[in-house]
Image: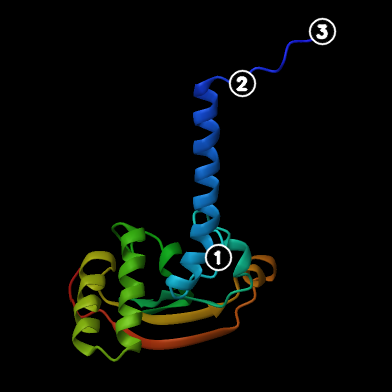
Amino acid sequence: MPAPPSAPPTRLRRLRRRLIAIVACYAIAGPVSQKAIPGVDEVFPFFGWSLFSRVPNLQTRYEVEILAHRGRALPEPVPFLRAGTPLVRGDRYVAHKVIAKLAQAHQEGEADEARRLRRLLESNYLARRVEYRLVAESFEPLARWRRGEIRERRVLATYHTTRRGR
């Protein structure tokens, strides 16, 4: 006659209880966070499903295009991130953040902040005697990735660097 099944070891029992408690808390936290925190549209908030729930999603990206250098117009506008060393310098990633803040300040009508950010951009990242424009592009990421499609393109402002020399 077979022996009756023995109870699992106490360590395994504790692990099983903890696992059940974690899953229960996780299942409760998702719907609670959806009600308690405005803007949360995920049922399970601890990992990022938002990549899938928000596609297509209209995004706006800001860019600086260089139009002329030392009084000479360039054959075509050069995007800041693709411009060569004579036109731009410094950390382009940080500069791109400054560009985004400049565009936001410009759109919100914060003239003093826009002037401060413009001076920062020109003194740290652009060559002297450069004409450039601030551009906003709206697009859906998948459409842009697949077909290069941009929904809207607006020129926010055109500037000349205020520094002289070189």
Among numbered discs 3 and 1, the one appearing first in the sequence: 3
The residue furthest bottom is 109
Relative depth, front residue between 49 and 84: 49
What amino acid does circle 1 point to?
Answer: Glu
In the rendered structure, which disc, 2 or 1, sits on the residue that comes first in sequence? 2
Residue in the image at 38% along x and 82% along y: 133
The number of numbered badges drawn on the structure is 3
Q: Which residue is mark 1?
A: 42
Horizontal arrangement in the rendering, residue 79 relative to residue 123 (left or right): right
Instruction: Determine which quarter of the picture holds residue 2.
Output: top right
Q: Give the SS element for disc 2.
A: loop
- Give the label on residue 118, or none: none
Q: Which residue is mark 2?
A: 7
Residue at 49% over, 70% down: 40
Q: Which residue is mark 3?
A: 1
* SS label for mark 3: loop
Q: Position of residue 105 (x, y in %)?
A: 29, 83
Mark before the other along the chain sequence, 3 or 2: 3
Q: Amino acid at mark 2?
A: Ala
The CA span between labels 3 and 2 is 18 Å
Q: Secondary structure at mark 1?
A: loop
Q: Is residue 39 above or below residue 8?
A: below
Q: Position of residue 165 (x, y in %)?
A: 17, 72
* Residue at horizontal 25 percent and vertical 88 percent from the top: 110
